[in-house]
Amino acid sequence: MSENKKIGADALMTKGWLGAHRWLLLRRASQLGILALFLLGPWAGLWLIKGNLAYSLTLETLPLADPYVLLQSLLTGHVPERLALIGAALVIGLYVVIGGRSYCSWVCPLNMLTDLAAWLRRRLGIKGGAHFSRNTRYWLLAMTLLLAAATGTIVWEMLNPVAMLHRGIIFGLGMAWSIVLAVFLFDLFVSPDGWCGHLCPVGAFYSLIGKASLLRVSATQRAACNDCMDCFAVCPEPQVIKPALKGQAKGIGPLITSHNCTNCGRCIDVCSKDVFGFASRFNNKAEVSAPQGGATALGNRS
């Protein structure tokens, strides 16, 4: 991809602005809509949802509980109430279907800030930065669980920027602004996609839930790929794309099977060739076609 070429420029030309931002707009609507439902109670006295992302009760009937928080609670030696167990089971069932890390891109309010940091990095031309292994988040996940068991308290929830931001927007951030700001500046100046892509134990937990998820992004039209690299540029987990996009000659199907895919849909938005789309995990047949007229298995790039 040319240094001077704007990411997604071809998609803008072929699909128009709305077509090139469809999934991004839907994600923002989801994130802001969920926040609005929580805000209706304390701000307008309309309590459709009571609680926060850790535990909520919708219309006094439907319980939803964060299974990560519930697991930490169990490790502290506390037995959650029946409604919390039901709520956690419902959330697990949902993310088994749509993909665990869909939480990161469609629900998490901090994602809007880290996306902004990533966008600013590209606009300002900030290159390089510190690099951490993407497995670091799993070590941090294990550490939060060990701390809960060792201390008898849910230590992580006292420091969790996601929970801090969500509670802060509803009730006022106070000093929590400093931690949220630190995450934003970390992603902007220190490490690209550093928090969500390398460190966040919440995302690590949900990625484990989503290992067998039914809904996946698929490079169904990968033969049309023109190697513009825009999908790699906007993806917060670019390492998940290559096997599905470039693995046809090796007999690898077009489905992105990695549990670290966030199902954000940005690869769909920025692709002018409509290579990507959402599909079922069962639709992953690799079709290796014989080269014709100098074309490769990925299609003629001439």
Image: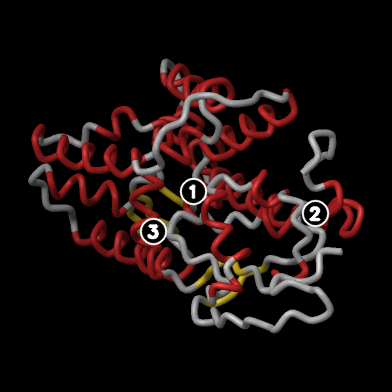
Residue 104's disc number: 1
Residue situated furthest front in the rendering? 294
Q: Amino acid at mark 1?
A: Cys
Question: Going 51% across and 36% down the picture, which residue do you hit?
Answer: 110
Within 10 angstroms of label 3, few (less than 14), some, or many (20 or more) residues? few
Within 10 angstroms of label 2, few (less than 14), some, or many (20 or more) residues? many
Q: Amino acid at mark 3?
A: Glu
Question: Going 29% across and 49% down the picture, which residue do you hit?
Answer: 68
Q: Is residue 246 visible?
A: yes
CA gap, disc 2 and disc 3: 39 Å
Name the element at disc 1. helix
Say if 93 sits above or below 284 in the image. above
Say if 61 sits above or below 279 in the image. above
Q: Position of residue 15 (x, y in %)?
A: 87, 59
Disc 3 designates what residue? 60
Q: Is residue 51 visible?
A: no
